[in-house]
Amino acid sequence: MAKKNKSFAGENIKYVRTDNGLSQEAFAEKFNIKRDNLAKYETSKAEPDVDFISVVCETYGYSIEDFFHKRLNAESFVELQHKLANQEKRFADLQEQFNELAAMNLRLQKKLLDISDNEEVKKATNVDAFRHTDELSQAAEPAAGYNEKDK
């Protein structure tokens, strides 16, 4: 004889309802079901309709599979908090790596600017040297072409 899997749907309906501070009346009205049916679901005297569970899950952010097969209680909340803490740590680690890479990128950009500035200085220095050389040679030409007759 096959063992029937226990459904946690009724227990989870009650958990979600009370966790959100709703009375049976308010919850039943919100999801357009009879309060008597809701009471039967919560006490597992009747199995809730999958469409109803689907809407509840969509409204409160649960998976339908989890809603039927897992207890959505404080214990699962602790598990979610643990997962969240792990994700936050991973995010912080990634953010730190990103900041290190961004700082490295800035240092490399500065070095590239320094190198390009040095190249510009070299070019400018060479141009000035050529200009200075041209000026000296021009100044020297009349002196070289100076003739005693011109006196």
Image (cartoon, rainbow, N blue to C red):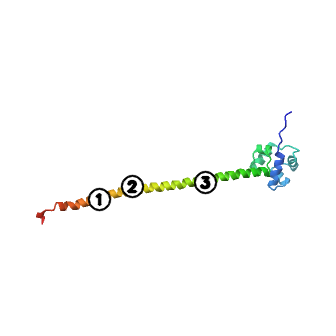
Callout 1, which amino acid? Answer: Arg
User: Label 2: few (<14), some or many (≥20) within 10 Å?
Assistant: few
First along the sequence among labels 2 and 3 = 3
Report x, y in % for residue 106: 51, 56
Query: Reading the chain from its start, which is encountered first: label 1 or label 3?
Result: 3
Q: Is disc 1 surrounded by few (<14), some (14 to 19) or many (20+) residues within 10 Å?
A: few
- The kind of secondary structure element at disc 1 is helix
N-term mark: 2 or 1: 2
Q: Is residue 1 left or right of residue 82?
A: right
Please report the residue visible at 84 percent of the width from the left and 48 percent of the height from the top. Answer: 11
Dot 2: element? helix
Indicate left or right for 86 with 98 as reference.
Answer: right
Q: To which residue does mark 1 refer?
A: 131
128 to 2, vertically: above or below: below
Instruction: Please state, as top left, top right, bottom left or bottom right, where the C terminus lies in the image.
Output: bottom left
User: Residue 48 shows which numbered tag?
Assistant: none
- Under tag 3, what secondary structure? helix
* Residue type at numbered disc 2: Glu
- Marks 2/3 in contact by CB < 8 Å: the verdict is no
Query: Which residue is most to the top?
Result: 1
Kind of residue sitting beneath label 3: Gln
Q: Which residue is denoted by mark 3 in the rendering?
A: 95
Which numbered mark, 2 or 1, is in the foreground of this view? Answer: 2
Gap in angstroms between the C-alphas marked 2 and 1: 18 Å
Q: Which residue is mark 2?
A: 119
Q: Residue at x 12, y 64 (%)?
A: 150
